[in-house]
Image: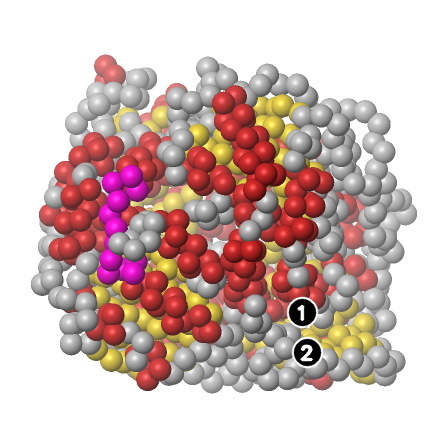
Amino acid sequence: MKRIITTLFVSLVFVSIGFGQTKLIEKVTQSDGELVIPYEKYILDNGLTLIIHEDDSDPLVHVDVTYHVGSAREELGKSGFAHFFEHMMFQGSENIADEEHFKIVSESGGTLNGTTNRDRTNYFETLPSNQLEIALWLEADRMGFLLPAVTQQKFEVQRSTVKNEKQQNYDNRAYGLYSELNAASLYPYGHPYSWLTIGKLEDLDRANLEDLKNFFLRWYGPNNAVLTVGGDVNPEEVVALVEKYFGVIPSGPEVEEMELEPVTIEEDRYVSYVDNNIRFPALIFTYPTVPRFHEDEAPLDFLAQILGTGRSSYFFQKFVQTQKAIQAFAGNSSSELAGEFSMFVLPYPGQTLAGFETEMRGILEQFAEDGVSDEDLMKIKASYESSFINRLANVSGKVSQLASYEIFAESANFIESDLQRYLDVTKEDIMRVFNKYVYQQPAVVQSVLPNEDTEPAKPDSYTPPTEGENPYPQADYTGLQYERPTGDDFDRSEKPEPKTAPLVQVPEFWKDSFNNGIEVIGTNYNEIPIVTLQLSIQGGHRMNAYEPDKAGLASLTASMLNESTENYTAEEIQEELRKTASTVRVSSGNSSTTVYISTLKKNLDRTLELAEEIMMRPGFDESDFSRVKMQQLEGLRSSYQNPASVAGMVYNRLLYGDEHIYSVSSSGLEETIERISLDDVKTFYEKYYDPQLSELVIVGDIEEDEILSKLDFLREWEPKDAEVPDLPEVEPAENTKIYLVDKKGAPQSQIRIGYMTDLTFDATGEYYKTGLMNYVLGGAFNSRINLNLREDKGWTYGARTYFTASDEPGPFTAAAGIKAAATDSAVYEFMKEITEYREGGITEEELEFMRNSIGQRDAREYEAPYQKAGFLRQIIRYDLDESFVDEQAYIIQTISQEEINDLAKKHLQPEGFYILVVGDAESHRENLEALGYEVIAVTEKGDIISEYEEGNTSGEGEQ
């Protein structure tokens, strides 16, 4: 196999000199064309590891602080602390006020976040490179000066916020609780992986402020952290700034590596639970395997691909291809201390899980007999190599990789070894791990049931223990005391002044047009050797307006183009793509159908051959159609179980009214999908897949002449003279009403509030300016609405407002998932905030915040290939001149407080809101009525329920 990397030239320097108290430990350099992330590594006297990656391709800096602490360091009965601290670290510190962290980074033109997993917690910012010092000042303050600012009130608000996150992402989500039951069933009592990172609600309820402070003192010292800085930076300057801000922070207690015995189970453990959010039952096998970077991890990952990834996989062939299941896959996941190999199947209703268990075990028997083919191994390695390279498409990806390697691998310079261990996997390796960890080995066998009447694969044989002796090592929290860092020769309370803002260059691009009507735009991107093409065919779901009784046809047609062609079966064409580690995918949305093509440059010619086959010679096979239609139909039925999906569908029906095609999901309705035939699909393709409606965006490591010379199949595409249909005007609501969809027992309510505007997309006109107006209302983390509902009251994981539009008018929307008990209060607060903003307008401080935030973020707008593609697609779709970026910058800096306030009065209307609540109707109806609005009961499909039908949400009324 031809490899894209060569032997690395690595310069390693081990010295004890450097800058002040900081020692240069290692330096890794790069020669042209080599797959390596160059960096310098330093150690401060307090144990902080500093890694610097210099990359001047964009005027950006990415700062990442990774602490080697995740949920695995928590105590039994005190779970969720690591994740809780991810929230608390954004609540201000001694020198940064409450809520200021997000505000400071946002108004610096940056973005930020934090994440927690079993083994580490990280905090990161991406900013214009002139804002480096601000990022370091912020991170140092919460590392060394957090605890003086931690209060009981902040603790309570964030505890409530975390509970809402748990309800939104686990309790109120389809299959959301399977991972919690799996962890408790697979790992022994007390094992640090036997609970989830989010923690248990009862543990969060028991926690107190002192517990939380002790957790911070134990694990958040600089000696347990890696600070990684990447981007357009000068290493000497970085070291000096890191010394300045982090150097006085004292080391924390020593942190030792955790070494645990491998997890084993003696016999199959059958467990189950009922999930009211699902339509399809699930059957999940989980086997204990090996930690990350173990020699068996790579062959286990490849085993999972053979069994459960792609159309040639055993699971797809056995279950999806035969229309027994809507989804089936296998996967291997390895963490620092242990790993898990899983097999997951979602059967269509009407089949038994016991039967599926027998068939899943039969697959393993078949694989034991078949073994691994040379072709399987070649495809998997090609695919892995491609995805590995794509991780390095932006500076944040490279910085994250360095930080992860530094903590969990042999060294930060592990990228070649990491790729090589996968490229070195043999067929024998895969069969060895199959026999050792999976074949005829005991597993947790979990059944997820849609109701009490569904039978599990077998009756439960195991109950996760909730008490007993804990044999695992416990951290020592005694004697911990906060010592405020001293020794600064500057005032930490003063925010650093940024340097001069970098000059941001809009990507250079070229344009062309083909005689058949395709408009083409492209730009060069040579940081990694990939080429991406995105063909957009105007129409999509909108074309269903010609035959609304067959809504869903555009989506079904796009799906069929991912199936068989004239010369390849569906399995064969996908396997050909896997051989070249390429992607050709067709999808359909509301206003367009998109053909997405991505490949390593070395495989471009073959990928374009396959793209031509897929686009120009679809097979439209009857068996493919039967399977894809069933998947679309069952997927739609399943969405009625999901509160967020229901909210989206019903909200659109309210906004657009039943005479508009956008009142129906692009997937259609059950009755419209049932009407669609294969001939309908063929006709839709022949009529509406038209080069005259098409725009092509090209981003990659290739010049204009070279790529255009390879696109004859697009030049020769015959025009169809298709026209995108006009859509009817939307009738506004006469007055504000609440529409209530009953989701019995829901721990959260999904809320949507909005109305249809008369705004269409423009890049520099009223639509653009309205977006600026909305920013401080609900468009930023520090917006009025999110600060109120999330940060002040702890009712939600996030609340926002936004305007959307294309060449057709779009809506204003306010949205959130709200804890059930606060449903009516949240509706009141939403409406209050919108009203107060409309009547009182923006403050001078908010106006300045908006200007700084949006005005400085251009530095991170064009970094990654997908960002460049989005920028170019906007230009070609709306026929923009590149000067629109300068016009936007001028608008941001000159728009007045008066103009913002006029826009708020004009576009935040006082009446005619649709207020939609999806939640427990019995609990909420009376309180919602007390708000003074008429409350109308509707089904999960948006049909109004007449009074005599109330309580029976399956009624079929007329809207």
- Which badge, 1 or 2, comes first in the chain's sequence? 2
Tell me the residue at 37%/55% (across/down).
573
Q: Position of residue 855 (x, y in %)?
A: 42, 74
Residue identifier under label 1: 416
Q: Position of residue 748 (x, y in %)?
A: 47, 33
Q: Which residues are magenta?
A: 613-624
Instruction: Return the residue nearer the eye: 53 or 325.
Output: 325
Q: Amino acid at mark 1?
A: Glu
Q: Quadrant of residue 471?
A: top right
SS class, disc 1 = helix
Residue 314 visible? The answer is yes
Q: Is residue 906 above or below residue 937?
A: below
The answer to whether 420 appears left or right of 696 in the picture is right
Magenta run includes residue 614? yes
State if disc 2 and disc 1 touch (CB < 8 Å): yes
Q: Amino acid at mark 2?
A: Leu
Q: Is residue 738 above or below residue 18?
A: above
Instruction: Return the residue nearer the eye: 96 or 541.
Output: 541
Quadrant position of the N terminus in the picture: bottom right
Q: Residue furthest right?
A: 479
Residue identifier under label 2: 8
Tell me the residue at 74%/53% (across/down).
294
Q: Is residue 599 above or below residue 778?
A: below
Residue 870 visible? The answer is no
SS class, disc 2 = loop
Measured Cα–Cα span from mark 1 to mark 2: 8 Å
Tell me the residue at 61%/28% (across/down).
445
Quadrant position of the C terminus in the picture: top left
